[in-house]
Image: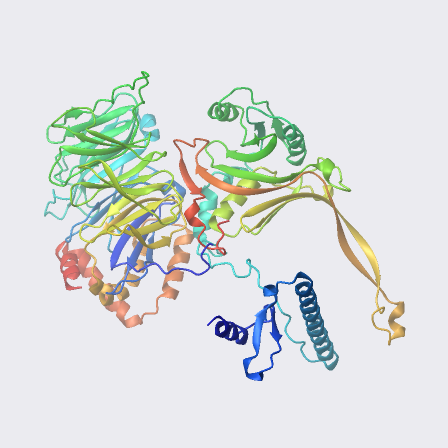
Amino acid sequence: MAKEKKRKAAEEAVDGDDYIEREDKNPKKQKLILASQIKNKEKRSAVYAKLKHEKRVEKRKKIKARDAASKQALELGEEPPEKMVPRTIENTRELDETVCRPDDEELFAGNDADEFSAVLKQQTAPKVLITTCRFNSSRGPAFIKELLSVIPNAQYYKRGTYELKKIVEYAKNKEFTSIIVVHTNRREPDALLLIGLPDGPTAHFRLSNLVLRKDIKNHGNPTSHEPELVLNNFTTRLGHRVGRMIQSLFPQVPNFRGRRVVTFHNQRDFIFFRHHRYVFEVKEKKEGLKDKKSKASQGKTEKKAIARLQECGPRFTLKLVSLQHGTFDTKGGEFEWVHKADMDTSRRRFFI
Amino acid sequence: MPRTSTVESPGCPPLRALTTDSLGLIKVVEVRGKGGGTPQVVETWGPPDASRSVLATSYADRKKDPVLAVARKNGLIEFLNPLKGDVLTTIKASESGSTDQSASANDLLVGLHFFKSKQEDSSSMLGTLLTCTEKGKVCIRSVGRSDAPSDQSIDSPNEWSVTNGGHVLCSSLDPSENYALFGGKHVELNLWDLNSSKKIWAAKPPRPNNLGISIPTWFTASTFLCKDDHRKIVAGTNQHQVRLYDITSQRRAVISIDFRESPIKAVREDTDGHTVYVGTAIGDLASFDMRTGKMVGCYKGKCCGSIRSIAKHPDLPLIASCGLDSYLRIWDTNKRQLLSAVFLKQHLTSVVIDSHFTAQELEGTKPEEPTSQSEVRDQSDQGGNCDEERSRKSKKKRKDAAGKKEKKMKMHDEEQISGIEDPAEKRLDR
C-alpha cells in the first residue's frame, strides 16, 4: 500500500521532491524512495549532495537559456521574452475594499473635516510634546534625544507622576498639537503613543528593532532644517488616517536645501522609520564598455545624476495596535480600529 | 495555520437599510434579489459636510408615509422621505422660546424620537417630535410640512428640563409612546409620563461594594425591553454593565451583568421581549437573555470599531450594526453569524432598517430612482460643486432611456400635488 502511494506520489513529483530511483532487478517494480529514508548517514549525505548538485546545474542551465533567449531577441530587434516576476505576499495581497480611490470626494471631505486638517492646511504650526512612561531607563533617554533631533519643534517633559489624562489637559492649555509618549518595557522602548490634540485620535504603536544613531555605521549628523517627509504605501482608509496623523507631527513646508528626509514606509502593516541625509552628485559614466565592437563610441561619457544617502538618526519599526477616537482613554473611549486575533484569518490581508 | 483562501459569507435576505454618518451623508443599502445576495449601496443623499454630521435619527417605520427624522450638528432637524430622499421639511432644533441663544448653541441634540402612532390625516402636519439635548432640555412639538399654508395653527411646544447637572447621553421612547426614558453621565435613569410631563420613576445607584467604593453613574445606552410593557428597562453603562430595571419592583437594578471591559454603546431589544443585543466601544456585539441574565452568545465577525447603533428587523431574524470602523454589518440572530459587511467609508452614527421593502419592488424602483435623484438635486436647497458633480456622475451611471424618465417625472409631479394617498398606492403596487 505504502509503495503504491509512493509511486503515485513520484508520478506527481515536482522538482522540489527528493526522490531517487532505486534500481531494481525487475524493471516493472521500479521503486522511488525519499532520500531522507536512507538510514546510513554517509550514504544519505552523499545522496543529498548529489541531488543538490543536480538541482544547481539545472538552475544554471535555465538561467543561461533565459539570458540567451533575451539577448537573442534584443539583437534581432524582437521583444524579449517576458521577465518572470516572483510571487510575493504583497503581489498576492487580498483585494481590499477599503483602499482609497483617487476620485473619492467623500475622502476629500473627510480630510477637510478631520482633526489634522488645521495643521495640514498650515493654519497652526505643529508643536510636539514628548514624554515617557513613569519609569524610564537605559535606551529610553537616548531614543528621546534622537527623536528630539528628528522632529522639529519638539519638546521633552519629564513624566513625573502625572496621569496621562492630566498631561493631555496641560498640553492643550499650552497649545501643543500632539503628544508622543514613549513607553519602556524591560529597559527598552517598547511602544509609542501618538495623541492628537485638542480632540484628535490616539494611536498606539508597538515599537521594535530600534537602532540608535551611534550603532549605525557611517552615520551622519542631522541638521536642523525642516525635513522632507516620505510616506509610502499607506493605501487603505485606515492607512490614510494614520499617514495624516504622522504628517501632522512635521512642518508642512520642508526646507529642500537642507537635504534631509524622513521616511515612513509601510509594508505588511509594519511601518519602517528611516532618517537620511542625501546629496545629488553628477557622475560621469563611460558608455561603450559593454559593447566592444563599436570602439568609436568610447569617447562619449554620459553624465548621470545620482543621489547618495547617508543614514542618520534612529531606525525603528512600528506596528499599529489600536486607533482610538478621542484623546487617551482606553477604558472609556471608543475605538476606531483595534487589532483582534480573529482578524488574522488570511496571510494576505493587511489593514494599513 | 491561517486560512489562505477566502470564505464566502452567506448572502442576506432582501432588505433595505439606511445609514447615517459623521459627514452628514445618508446611504441606502439594499439587498435585491428574491433569493438574497450581497448588499450594495444604491443611493447616497446629501453633500459630504462635517457640520451636517448626523447626531441622532428616528425612523417612523410605517407602510404609509414613512418619515426619517435626522438631527444634524448644525442645529437643524431634517425630515426626509426615506424612499426618495427628498427633504420634506427642516426645523431648527432650538426653539425661539429659549432664553439665551448662546447656551443652546453648544447644546447638541442627543435624542430624537418621532411619534409613529400619532399620525394625523391632515396634509399639513407631519407629526409630533420629541427632542432631547445634552443639557437635559426636552421638547415635544408638532412639525408641519414645508408646503403647508403658514396660517395653520401649530400647537405650542411642550418643554421641560430633565436634569439639573450632568449630561444626558441616552434617551428612549416606549413603543406605546406615552413614556420616555432619559439617562446619562451623572444622570440617573428617569422615566417620564409624556401626557402629564411628570417624572414617574427614577433609578437608584447600586449599593457601594464592601470596600465602600461606589461607581459613578454613567448611562450610555438604554431601551425599553418589551414593546407592550413600559415597565422593564435595559440600560448599558460606561462601566461595561448591562442592567435590567423593573419600575414596579424597585428603584435599584434587578439584574446587573458585567460584559467585558469596554463601555456599552448600543442596546437594542428583540421583538420577543426578553433578548437584548448589546454593542460595546471596542466592537464586541453580544446578545443577552434578560429573564436569566445570562449571555446567549457573542457575534464574531472582525468588528474592530466601536458599535454606535444596532437595528433589529421587525420580522426577519436579522440585526444590522454600524460603527466607527465604517462598516455596516448584517448578522443572523439565530446562528449569530455574519451575513455580510458593507464598507461605507465614514464613521457611521446610526442605522435603521426599512421593513416594508420587498424584493418585488425591483422593477418599479430602479427606473424611478434616477429621476428622483435628479429632482432631488434640483429641489434641495443644498448648494455646492459636489452636488452637481454627483448628479452628473449619477446621470452617467444610470443607463435609462430618456422616454421612461419623462413619464416618471410626470408621475412624480402628480404625487406631490395630491398628497399622502399616492405614495401609499405606489408602494402597495410595487
Q: Position of residue A351 (x, y in %)?
A: 48, 50
**Residue at (45% x, 44% y) in the render:** A339
Q: Nearer the viewer, residue A103 or B269?
A: B269
The answer to whether residue A259 is left or right of residue B97 is right
User: Does residue B369 lie above or below A310 as drawn?
Assistant: below
Q: Where is residue A96 in the image (x, y as percent from the top left)?
A: 46, 56
> Which quadrant holds residue B54?
top left
Q: Residue furthest top?
A: B212
Q: Residue furthest bottom?
A: A27
Q: Which of A79 and A191 is in front in this view?
A: A191
The answer to whether residue A52 is left or right of residue B95 is right
User: Does residue B363 lie above or below B340 as drawn?
Assistant: below
Q: Is residue A222 visible?
A: no
Total marks drawn?
0
The answer to whether residue A100 is left or right of residue A232 is left
Q: Which of B219 and B239 is in front in this view?
A: B239
Q: Position of residue B78 (x, y in %)?
A: 27, 44
**Residue at (56% x, 76% y) in the render:** A31
User: Does residue A42 lie above or below A139 as drawn?
Assistant: below
> Which quadrant holds residue A208?
top right
**Residue at (31% x, 35% y) in the render:** B259
Q: Position of residue B288 (x, y in %)?
A: 24, 40
Q: Residue furthest front?
A: A25
